[in-house]
Image: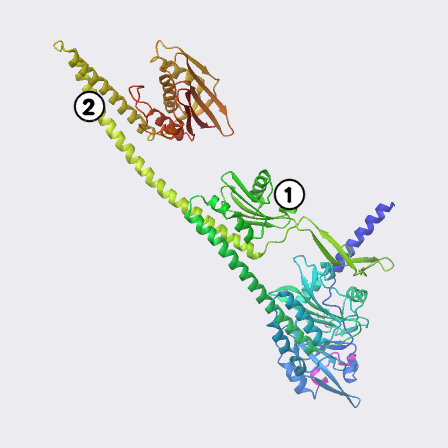
Amino acid sequence: MTRENRDDESEERFERMLAECAKEPIHVPGTVQNHGILFALDHNWVVTHVSENADLLQGIPASDQLGASFLHLFKGYEQELLEPLSHISEEGHLISLDTVSIAIGGSITQYSAAAHRYHEKLIVEFERVEDQVLTSSEDVYALLPTFVNRLEWAATVSDLYQMTAEEVKRITGFHRVLIYKFDEKWNGTVVGEARSEDFPSYFDLRFPASDIPEQARRLYSINRFRLIADAGSESVAIMGLATEGKTLDLTHSILRSVSPVHIQYLKNMGITASMSVSIMQGDRLWGLISCHHKVAKKVSVNARIVCDLLGRLFSQHLRALEERSVLIQKLTLKSGYDAVIRSMSEESDFVGTLLRYSDRMMELFEAHGFAVVLDGKCALRGLTPTEDEVRALVESLSVTGDPDVYTTDSIRSSFPDGERYSAIASGVLAISISHIHKSYVLWFRPEVIQTVKWGGDPKKPVVMDPPQSRLQPRASFELWKETVTGKSLPWSESEVEATRDLRHGIVDVVLRRAEELASLSIELERSNRELEAFSYSVSHDLRAPFRHIISYAELLEEESDIQSERSRRFISTIIASARQAGNLVDSLLAFSQMGRGSLMRTSVDMNEMVQEVREDVMRDAIGRTIEWRISSLPTVDADVMMLRLAIRNLLANAVKFTSKRKDALIEIGWEERDSEHLFFVRDNGVGFDMAFEDKLFGVFQRLHSTEEFEGTGIGLANVRRIVSRHGGRTWGWGEVDKGAAFFFTLPR
């Protein structure tokens, strides 16, 4: 077998034993600590379980007490013991009884007693009062007012940590008291400490989650205080009736013995006695008040209960301090983003508003960079990734991120591409302002390199003991430093909540504006329908009168008795004007029909259409020399009749406005875009001033007089309407006396 194979097998065995250790049933050890005596009673007061040292209590062998009536065993102790026990009904709730003075062999020994009900058993536990710290309720509770008074002076959580550690040390006399806080991964950090000068400091050290495994944390959540009076003493076995089918559950016991691994852990720390008090926030274990002593130490049940009460007061005041801090932060954030929302609601360009407030937005959320991605546009402020990197991040967020708010303090752990810019943007806070489009507002925080101080190597929480083939807790608690990179300061819950509120505000503004635009659109559509109906009716009704005028004027012109040249000129003017008016009416009618009819899309060969239209318009330019440069054009999806009219208007205009050029040139070409075809018609005619470009596509908008160039002023308006109905765009370019170009697009 190779060394590599041996190493692999050892590692596999190590992992397997570590998993088995995590499953250790520490709540049913079958033994108790030897400084106390335990009885378990059924509902008839029969002793079903008893610790083997029960003979110390009254001189009766433990085996003789097993199966006996507890009422008979403690006859004569009704007032201080039996009567209080009969009133215990709440399961899992520990009750501390008055001191019980028990006579044996002519001497009196005082015991403190505590009891609780669990799994249909009444468990009664006795501890000798001798050498215990603070045994009487009066002595213990007299210490609480001092702590309560000091609470009022704890302005920060750091003050509270330190004050609590000092107070517990004062009450119990332990050599070292630690405030031990769990993180989200159950690693623990010492955030407060009070110690004797000869004890090493653990302040600000972090300990891996494996130091307090999951089953131990679960017990800490249930049984809120725990004393190990002497880690070097032997535990005492529990005897049980043969009829009892399972081991006694000591989840709530105050005498429950200690796991051998934990005993060794304490010895490795140089600790003989320890006590812990659980600190709960709601139903979650926030941390522990952990007490250490070099030599064996007994602390009375009353003192432990008072420390538990102190831990509860600590928890409540901690919550109050944190809630006050959160409230202040929320109010600060709200006042900041409210100003942004107000400005957005009053202005049409809300992206511009966000960018104008970018410095304030970064200040509020303690960010160094800010970005807005909306409608395909990306705007960056401060220290951010590149535009391409931000767009790629938004693309990923739209697929994998939270639909409303996304946060991370380590972008490279979430997105592999984030490694490239993690130094400037390890932290990302992003809100989506549209579930349809990829629109986001983002904040960025830079990497903060941290040195984490561990109490020993966190990668070696346990070690193998080859001779015994079992796991041993690590023996070293020397300072071990770890450098953490690729992470920013974390985003607080208040900041995340504030961005949710900001998002709701932005969405409300966008929706309100969309409703306003929809209302205007409906009104505009109604007005357009009425206008189209009116123009159709007027143009249709005017066609016949103009035809009559032309017809009668032509008949009058043919009359032989009209000899006056002046009269004939008048009649010619009437005919020309009537024809011009008729053409105008026909054009207006065609324009109104452009908006009324439905599109009949089909495949159109632009080469064939342009050639046919070119031949048609050249019939009105007989005798002229025009150079046509026509590119090879694509096939498009369009309404044949409408597109033909648009092309005819553009080519007819080009022919008309080059009429004064000896060497007229008309060019027709196209470009292929990502999502559209771009067409253009360019000429070297009279051109136009770009200052009037916005008028070109309006109805009856002319830049030249009818004396210079004939026309109705509706041609380009028809082009725009036709192209718009196809989903395209139109615009023009011109230069006076140098030519013009007209562009339009059609979707691919």
Q: Amino acid at mark 1?
A: Tyr
Q: In what quadrant of the picture does the N terminus appear?
A: top right
Residue 567: x percent and y percent? 15, 14
Residue 37: x percent and y percent? 75, 78
Residue 377 located left or right of residue 535: right
How much space separates mark 2 and mark 1, taking CA atoms?
A: 76 Å
Residue 242 located left or right of residue 633: right
Q: Amino acid at mark 2?
A: Pro
Dot 1: element:
helix
Residue sitting at x 74%, y 82%? 129
Disc 2 designates what residue?
A: 545
Region rendered in magenta = 62-74
Mark 2 packing: few (<14 Cα in 10 Å), some, or many (20+)? few
Residue 623: x percent and y percent? 35, 9
**Discs 2/1, front:** 1
Disc 1 designates what residue?
A: 421
Residue sitting at x 66%, y 51%? 448
